[in-house]
Amino acid sequence: GWLLRLARVRSPQKTVWLTFEPPGAPNIVLLESYLRALADTGTWNGRWVVSLDSDLRGALARGDAKAISDWKAIAAAVRFFENHRGWSALEPLGVVGVVSDFSGPNESTSQEILNLLGRRSLAYRILPASAAATASLAGFHALIYVDEGTPAPPLRNRLLAFAEHGGLVMTGAGWNHEGKPTGMDHPRVDVRRLGKGRLAICKDSSQDPFMMARDVHMLLGRTYDVARFFNLSAFLSYCSASPDRAQELVQIVSFAIRFANDLATAWVPGRFASARLWSLGSKSSSPVEMLPENGGTSLLLPPVPVYAGIELSRRAS
């Protein structure tokens, strides 16, 4: 997901195709593995060059009934995302902005932070360093800047102004320690008060992407979550919306073995007029039961064996 999102930011007019092969013998590749590969690509608006393992190819050549059924399910999953290409017009929701050039000496750390923020279901947006000095920061509550050294003055001033107006800025160890100490005894970052906001400077020059993703979530808290998930494990999520927020989309890709009675819940802030669920390969959606809770809406979901896409509308249909 993070790789597709970064590619889309760099080349928004291009279609991104991924090529990866299923494992060979003696591994047994289940149908669910193919469906997850398609969901893990299609959710983030990419396309996978479908590649079948030798067992499935051989079974198809023999006309095996189960192989033909599996192939039809794979084809239906491909068709599902092609039929929902309109979702790609929705904009990613994100309260954390990751600012970097994502290349050279900064490639490994910055890209791993994208990966790890996604694993935490902490909604982020990508801000290329070359454009961040003038880009809109509306909707952000935290910015992470981890490139080596300090940024050019226009970007540096923009980041400091963001903190002064109430935001959280996390940086690498090379920054000057502006602001006033907060007295927070944090093992990895020096948290300082800057205007109405905070500046969190890593203490170690060798930043750990895992800890940075964890610490920014801890410092930001759960107040600004764009979604929360319950009774799900080993999953990825992607939340997007129309510019006016009248339509929102929550997509879930599950990598865990789920049982038939494993019901799940997703919570989203705000109120909605309707919620409808799409399963992978389905030709129509079904209504989702909604309950008002904690200033938002809880969505009571059926089991999610591989994928779920929940369309939310603030307007009555």
Image (cartoon, rainbow, N blue to C red):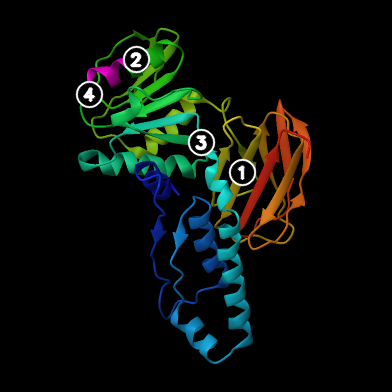
- Does the CB distance between marks 1 and 2 fall below 8 Å? no
The magenta segment is: 150-157
Residue indicated by mark 3 = 123
What is the CA distance from the residue labelled 1 to the residue labelled 2? Answer: 32 Å
Q: Which of pointers 1 and 2 lies earlier in the amino acid sequence?
A: 2
In the image, residue 134 lies at what x, y percent?
35, 22
Tell me if mark 3 has few (under 14), some (14-19) or many (20+) residues whose alpha carbon lies within 10 angstroms of its own. Answer: many
Q: Secondary structure at mark 2?
A: helix
Earlier along the polypeptide chain: callout 2 or callout 3?
3
Amino acid at the residue labelled 2: Leu
Residue 183 in view of the camera:
no
Q: CA distance from mark 4 to mark 3?
A: 25 Å
Please name whichever residue, 24 or 273, is drawn nearer the observer in this view of the structure. Answer: 273
Residue highlighted by disc 2: 160
Type of amino acid at the residue the image marks with label 4: Thr
In the rendered view, tell whether residue 204 sits above or below residue 196: below
